[in-house]
Image (cartoon, rainbow, N blue to C red):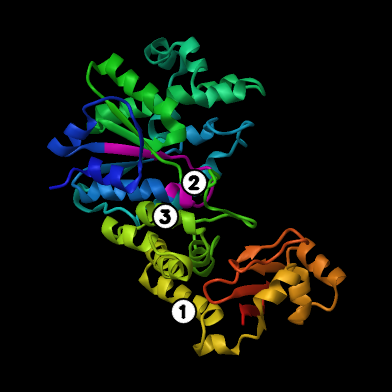
Amino acid sequence: MANVFDTLQERGFLKQTTHDGLKEMLGREKVKFYVGFDATADSLHVGHFVQLMAMAHMQRAGHVPIVLIGGGTTMIGDPSGKSDMRKMMTREIIAHNADRFREQIGKFLDFSDGKALMVDNADWLLDLNYVEFLREIGTCFSVNRMLTAECYKQRLEKGLTFFEFNYMLMQAYDFLVLSRKYGCTLEMGGDDQWSNILAGADLIRRKEQKEAYGLTITLLLKSDGKKMGKTESGAVWLDPEKTSPYDFYQYWRNVADADVKTCLSLLTFLPMDEVRRLSALKDHEINDAKKILAFEITKQVHGQAAAVEAQTAAEALFGSGGAGGSIPTTQISAAELAEHPQLLDIMIAAGLTKSRGEGRRLITQGGVLLNGEKVTDEFASLSEADLAGGGAMIRKGKKVFHKIILK
């Protein structure tokens, strides 16, 4: 039986591990591991989805996930990767968000027959005696060492409150509690959690005199190094009420060619031989890989029926024939595109706007989308690449669609 460590490594999940021995342990015994999710919003987003997929691979290999809902740590807010202190939230809002997380995570992991656990750190953090906590836990932490942690270093110039400074102790204490109550030996999390994970593993070694391991998961980044999962209209959420299955499908259908392999590897269960075959496709054929990518991810998050519906709607709008045949279409030659590449000129030629002034107003008011992405630059231009895969779709307002294709 393959070691899940090799699976995670081959698919690109692994970023850092605390020390040697983790791979051997994962191949030798059933391991209880945890990932924490602070309830800072009322839905998970695609960044969380990467971690859920890593957990699913672990569970499929026979290991036991512990989902830790951060009902307690959300009261403080993780300073990692933040230039300012997080907005403080009420217990009621946090509890509501935690309930929504529970609903969503239940779609990705099997919680039957003890195959996975879900716990809330509010159960042990909110009633802590602060002085006793400092005596037991605070004495194990060096302030000098904490200040070298990346999650704090980047905040020191702008200002780091003592309130937030406690976060690392809280997260480390979570690992200790889960170790004592459930025999948890591994913490997993995004690579921005490295300092906090190290702190938890070290705390267990100090307090329990036993090994504890940490593993960080690569962040979902585009080929240009920017975080994936952001659009002009905001984050790509897993909640269908916040990001519709159609928009979700379209987001993945329109990823850059260079990002196809990363997304197929991290966000689908397709065998790696198939991932390599699809990501090796070039030119127009890469669009076939993107369709498979979009369908597989949408199916994973929203279910088979929603994925089929989203795919059908996309084909109707962007495909040729069928319902798509009723969509107004303008053909332009490569020479015409080269001479007049600006989107405004093309919209005028297609009859979508009467003048450049009207077109500019539409764009500045957020009323124009190109291939599912909001246009914010009034001087935006189209290239032949934008028209690849069956043409470019311009949407004006909510209901007016127009396809631009090359002759």
Circles 1 and 2: CB atoms closer than 8 Å? no
Q: Amino acid at mark 1?
A: Thr
The answer to which of 336 and 375 lies nearer the viewer is 336
> Where does the magenta region start and end?
33-48
As drawn, 41 above or below 273: above
Quadrant where the image shows the C terminus? bottom right
Circles 3 and 2: CB atoms closer than 8 Å? no
Q: Amino acid at mark 2?
A: Leu
Tell me the CA gap for discs 3 and 1: 22 Å
Q: Is residue 249 visible?
A: yes
The residue at which mark 1 appears reads as 312
Drawn side of residue 328 relative to residue 1, left or right = right
The residue at which mark 3 appears reads as 263
Mark 1 lies on a secondary structure that is helix
| Figure disc tally | 3
As drawn, 112 above or below 351: above
- Closer to the chain start, of discs 1 and 2, is 2
- Closer to the chain start, of discs 3 and 1, is 3
As drawn, 23 above or below 207: below
Q: Is residue 44 visible?
A: no
Image point (33%, 59%), residue name: 275
As drawn, 144 above or below 58: above
